Every structure is written in structure tokens, then in C-alpha cells.
Amino acid sequence: MILSVLSLGFALMLTVVVVLHYRRRAASSAQDSLLTDDMIRQIEQQGRLDLEDEEPLDLDEIRELEEQFWEESWDEPEEW
């Protein structure tokens, strides 16, 4: 009886360790940020972030796509 309780306790402890290991591993890979330390320093010094490789937004293209979206016909939901 005591041996089975100890075995169950050990199995639970081992399960918790494995789950925590994978959660920490997943969290650390999700923390790969788009902001680097240099970017943060630039924000602190200048109050903004200038990105060199970004293209300016094409407002005409955005407006056209929005109009196309709203002009689409929407199917009415089916009644059950």
C-alpha cells in the first residue's frame, strides 16, 4: 500500500516536471520578440521607431480593397 502511494506520488511529480519543462520551453520560444534591444533604445532616445525596410502604405489600394470588401454579397444564414 505504501509502495503504491509512493509510486503514484512519484509518477505525479514526474508528470508535473515534464509538463512544466514543455511549458517553459514553449514560452521561451514565443518570447522571440520583434523588438530588439537597439530598437527599444531608439524608442527611449527618440520617442519613436524608424524602420528602414518598411514600404509606405498605399492608401488608394487600401481604400479599393475596403470598397471591394463591403460590396461583396453576403449569404443569409441558414435557418435550422
Image (spheres, grey):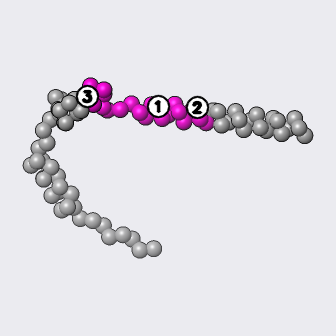
Q: Which kind of residue does numbered mark 3 sit on?
A: Arg
- Are there few (<14), some (14-19), or many (20+) residues within 10 Å of tag 3? few
Q: Which of marks 1 and 2 precedes in the sequence? A: 2
The residue to which callout 1 is attached is 28
Q: Earlier in the sequence, mark 2 or mark 3?
A: 2
Marks 3 and 2: in contact by CB < 8 Å?
no
Q: Position of residue 45 (x, y in %)?
A: 20, 30
Q: Which residues are magenta?
A: 19-41
Q: Residue pushed farthest left?
A: 60
Overall secondary structure of the magenta stretch? helix
Q: Residue furthest right?
A: 1
- Residues at discs 3 and 1 in contact (Cβ within 8 Å): no
Residue nearest the observer in this picture, 79 or 66: 66
Packing grade of label 1 (10 A; few <14, some 14-19, many >=20) is few
Foreground mark, 2 or 3, reads 3
User: Is the residue marked by circle 2 packed among few (<14), some (14-19), or many (20+) residues within 10 Å?
Assistant: few
Mark number displayed over residue 21 = 2
Which secondary structure lies at badge 1? helix
State the residue at coordinates (39%, 71%).
78
Q: Is residue 56 magenta?
A: no
**Quadrant in which residue 76 is drawn:** bottom left
Foreground residue, 2 or 58? 2
